Amino acid sequence: MNAPAFAPNPFVGLRPFEADESLLFFGRQQQIAELLRRLHDTRFLAVVGSSGCGKSSLVRAGLMPVLQAGFLVEDRDVWHIGKMKPGGAPIGNLATCLLTCAREGTGKADPGQVESLVRTIREGGAESILNQLGDLVANRDSNLLLLVDQFEEIFRFDQHGGPGGGSEEASDFVSILLDLAAQHEMPIYVVITMRSDFLGDCDVFFGLPEALNHSQYLVPRLSREQRREAIEGPIKLYRQEIASRLTDRLLNETIDTRDDLPVLQHALMRTWDCWQPDGRGPIDIGHYEQIGTIYRALSRDADAALEGMDERHLVWTKRLFQALTTVDSGNRGTRRPARLNDVAARSAADPADVWSIVNRFRSEGRSFLVASTEDLRADPLIDISHESLIRQWSILGKWVEEEAESIKIYKRLAETERLRKAGKSGLYRDQDLQVALDWQARESPNPAWAKHHQEDFDAAMAFLRESKEVRDNALAEAEFTRRWRRARVVIVALVLGLLFFDLGLRFISEFWRYCLTSVSYLLSALAQQVGKSNAQSVQGIAEAMTTTLRFGVHAALYLTLAFLVKQTYRAFAFPSILAAITGTAGQAAGQRKSKVTTVRKLIHSMPRFIEGLAKWTSIIAGVSVVGSCTVAGVSGGGGGVFVVLIGLVLGLLLVGWVFAVARLNAEVKTIRTELEQNRKPEPESMGRTTPDTTSPDATSREAMVRGDVNG
């Protein structure tokens, strides 16, 4: 027998065998015979097994070639075979499969015809399909085999839904398959392949558990002799030899039973590639160990595809594989086929760039990815060739975990936003906020990515931005308050210097002497009117009142300077503090205040300044009156008690007025705050979708603030 000419390598690697590679498919003869027998007994056959057990290869390279050779039905030896996967549109994929089968695989189904057939199937069910297939299987010698590979995809479609209701379409699809197999008008056979860990999920569809109980075939593991045949058979077919010690070692190697066969095929493919340049002698252990053995060959080969990529292409590669994988409700890593344009939109990349990455993982003997077509204009469907890649490639396993965690963070963010809108939650704070911000900076999510997991991406991002702004403003306010304490010390020192030294200016000393003389004169005149003229008492009272007035003037001076300096300092310093905390230089530039803006802000703050000045002036005046009246009363004899009482009443009236004004202002501020909280956000601010990816992490921010405090 001559060596087959269709492949330079007798091993297919990670992907399943196809029908035209049946000559290379060894070790399954008994199982193929059992499939034929069961398919003869029932027209619905479910080939079930764990991931990596060889279900697809058994049907494609085992059962289908035997059927096409004329077995199973004696008087019908012509077979039309349609192959499909449920994917994200089961009925649409079924219609495409049937139309392609009707064309005998000579051309691609027209999109208009597919859409028309989909409508017909949804309206008429299995009966409409029988009407469409009348010409195809009208001949008595013709049969139709419908292969639904990776049937477990229907459960993912049912879970996530689709246009028109995923659950309803999934149920209709399963019902149509069962009806096609149950009818006897036309010789139609249905074969599905499904992972065994999804068997428990089948009870969501009426009739499917009963059909599985009647026609299920659980793919067994290969025996030691069958594995030996699968190893040596293809090599012998190519008229080459493999060392018996290498065969024995391969038979004794142990790996995850789910991935045993695909990983073995990949290791044998790479061992053949390693041996072929020399091509002398048998394939031996040296060649096998050079490729990393069965334990490291796959991961090493996948890592090699990443070599030479720049950082941008590495990010796109990560996004590509994250788009092609998912973790279901049972925490099982599964494939998730995706369109090229969809992957490019998720990655914010050009489709041509993503396509170049896809080709890296299916060239140079690699078969990690498969595409439905080579025409980029047709938006090819991309898929991982086998789920064992998810479990055996350590980098991909990490990417899958990161994507699952990213989805959890985003769903929680979107749910919290909805709860806040309903009044049942507040903004993100503390650790929750920082986790979400770190996720946003790390993953740079966009609407194309988010639509596959949760709606309202814009609202969720607006919620995150608002939470960040509130947090950053609070941090900036605290930092500004801390810095302001230093400036306030300078003002206090300046006012105290004025108080005790009056800067040594002569006119200031003359002013206070004039004030003392004036107060003494007024008090003397008042004492003469009430019939008392104690010059010593009058002089003491005058000095006390002048000192009180002096302290009051300096206190008012301090309050005025503190207010003006603080507002001016805040106008220039606060934006830079906020920019340092948020880490957004552009935002800081936009927040710089011009001189005109500063003046406007000061003018806007004047009412508050006047209010504060009036409050503290009233307090100082009240204290002065009480002190003065007390001194006058103590030194003035029996009538002094009345003067003290008058001073107390006046002081209490002034202080009461201050607190009344303060309470009124507090109520006004409360009403204003409630109005602002109930005000709807502007549409423009709600529509921003550009994520803020420049926020520093919590450690750097805390270190910055802590450094300022310690400084």
Image (spheres, rainbow, N blue to C red):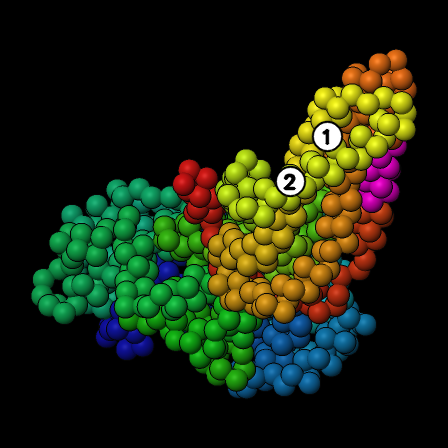
Taking 100 as reference, is 515 left or right?
right
Taking 116 as reference, is 695 left or right?
left
How far across and down, in percent of the image, does residue 185 sit? 73, 70
Q: Which residue is drawn at 21% across and 66% down?
A: 273
Residue 662 drawn in magenta: yes
For disc 2, the marked residue is 512
Task: Tell me which segment is drawn in magenta.
Answer: 653-666
Q: Which residue is drawn at 72% across and 56% down?
A: 605
Quarter of the image where the C terminus is located:
top left
How far across and down, in percent of the image, does residue 140 sit? 64, 77
How far across and down, in percent of the image, does residue 382 sit? 49, 69
Find numbered disc 1 in the image and state the secondary structure of the residue it sits on.
helix
Say whether residue 489 is visible: no
Find numbered disc 2 in the image and state the secondary structure of the residue it sits on.
helix
How far across and down, in percent of the image, does residue 452 sit? 62, 61
Q: In terms of depth relative to the viewer, which is nearer, 302 or 691?
A: 691
Using the image, determine if residue 552 lies above or below residue 137: above
Q: Earlier in the sequence, mark 1 or mark 2?
A: 2
Q: Report crowding for label 2: few under 14, some 14 to 19, many 20 or more residues within 10 A (C-alpha).
A: some
Q: In terms of depth relative to the viewer, which is nearer, 298 or 560?
A: 560
Q: Quadrant of residue 135?
A: bottom right
Look at label 2 and name its amino acid.
Trp
Taking 202 as reference, is 576 left or right?
left
- Residue 490, numbered label: none
Q: Which residue is drawn at 22% across and 53% down?
A: 292
For disc 1, the marked residue is 542
**What is the C-alpha distance between the residues marked 1 and 2?**
12 Å
| Dominant secondary structure of the residues highlighted in magenta in the image | helix
Using the image, determine if residue 28 lies above or below residue 682: above
